[in-house]
Image (spheres, helix red, strand yellow):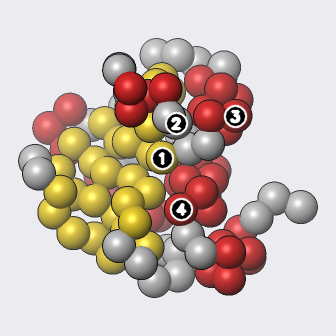
Amino acid sequence: MVSIGTYRKLALLFPEVVELPHFDRASFRVRNKIFSTVLERDHLVMVKLSVNDQWVFCAIDTEMIYPVPGGWGKGGATYINLKKINQNLLKDALTRAYCEVAPKKLSIAFERK
C-alpha cells in the first residue's frame, strides 16, 4: 500500500512537475501536460502510459493496475490502486508516464537504457 502523501512526493520528484487541480482530482503536470492524476477518495491514481507500457504494467495484476474504461484507456490511460501497489512499482509507472509526456530534454535522465 502507498499513501496519497507518498504518491505526491514521488510525482513531484521529476523536473518541472507542478500539482494543479483537474476537475475533482489533483493533476501532476510537466510543461502543462498531465502525466498523472489522483482521485483521493478512491485511492486511485491515473498514469498516462504508452499502449505498450500499459500492456506490460497491466500484465502484473489487473486488480492493481488496469486500463481506464473507455477510449482513454485504449490510448494508455491506466488506473493504479494505491491500496494494492508497492512504492517501487508505483515509482516505475510514474517514471514511464513522466517520460511519455515530458520533453525529451527533461526525460532523458529517466529513460530506460
Q: Which residue is mark 3?
A: 52
Alpha-carbon distance for marks 2 and 1? Answer: 6 Å
Of helix, strand and loop, which one carries label 2?
A: loop
What is the x, y in percent for residue 21?
A: 16, 63
Of helix, strand and loop, which one carries label 1?
A: strand
Can residue 91 be seen in the rendering of this structure?
A: no
Q: Which residue is mark 4?
A: 101
What is the x, y in percent for residue 5?
A: 30, 59
Q: Quadrant of residue 50?
A: top right
Alpha-carbon distance for marks 3 and 1? Answer: 11 Å
Q: Which residue is mark 1?
A: 48
Q: Amino acid at mark 3?
A: Asn
In the image: residue 55, left or right of residue 76: right
In the image: residue 80, left or right of residue 91: left
Q: Nearer the viewer, residue 5 or 101?
A: 101
Q: Amino acid at mark 4?
A: Val
**Of label 1 and label 4, which has the lower sequence position?**
1
